[in-house]
Image: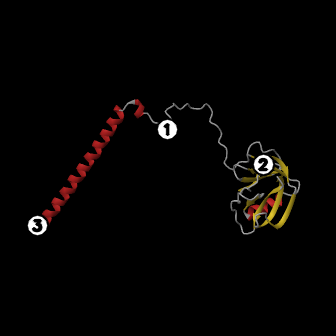
Amino acid sequence: MHVKGELTVARGSSGIVAGLTAAAVAAVCFLAYQASANAPDSVAAPSAGLSSAPVKPSVKPEPTKEPLAVPEDSDTGARVVYGLKDRRVWIVDDKEETLRTFPVMPSSVSPLPGVYTVSSRSGTIKGSDGVLIEHVVRFANVDDVSVGFSAAQDGSMKSPDPTMKTGGVRMKRADGDVLWTFATVGVKVVVVP
């Protein structure tokens, strides 16, 4: 009988704790409601960021640009598009479809934005930075530096030494294979900012 009495007290204690917890939750909810109802408009109004200026709904939502879409003003037709700021290349066919896009590591010497053509190609050579490269596709000359796309045979895409004048725009070997097949001599290369 003595054990039974202890169980009764334990059950009674848990009921009291549960009741107190429910009462505390209800009190907090009530106080939160009161605080929001009595808050000044400057505090109670939801904020649209750090600006206190009212947000004007737009009449027509602006279309969002795909992050990997071919840059606008990159000419038309079959071409290779090289985005300097994006550090990216797009291979575009004559139906304006992107066949492939991939990141590149820019050279220390970059051509100005404009339209160029593939002027020469080399299967495998040593780059001006001493790295063995393949699938070299040259399209511009800047201050006696030949600029072109290439892939390091070791697969690296290291940042160029800024103290050296190099024109190799590096890419991964798989991307270099695709570019090599597409960008034959005479194919258009469009450089965009």
Residue linked to disc 2: 191
Q: Earlier in the sequence, mark 2 or mark 1?
A: 1
Kindly identify the amino acid type of the residue bearing the numbered disc 2.
Answer: Val
Q: Is residue 1 among what the camera can see?
A: no
Q: Position of residue 32 (x, y in %)?
A: 33, 39
Q: Compared to 38, does 168 lie above or below?
A: below
Out of 30 and 13, give the one closest to the viewer: 30
- Spot occupied by residue 127 in the image (x, y as percentages of width and height): 79, 64
Q: Amino acid at mark 3?
A: His
Note whether residue 61 is visible: yes
Q: Are marks 3 and 2 in contact (CB under 8 Å)?
A: no
**Relative to 192, is 50 on the left or the right?**
left
The circle drawn on residue 152 is none
Q: Which mark is residue 50?
A: 1
Question: Left of 164 or right of it: where is 146?
Answer: right
- Dot 2 and dot 1 residues touching (CB under 8 Å): no
Quarter-of-image position of residue 155: bottom right
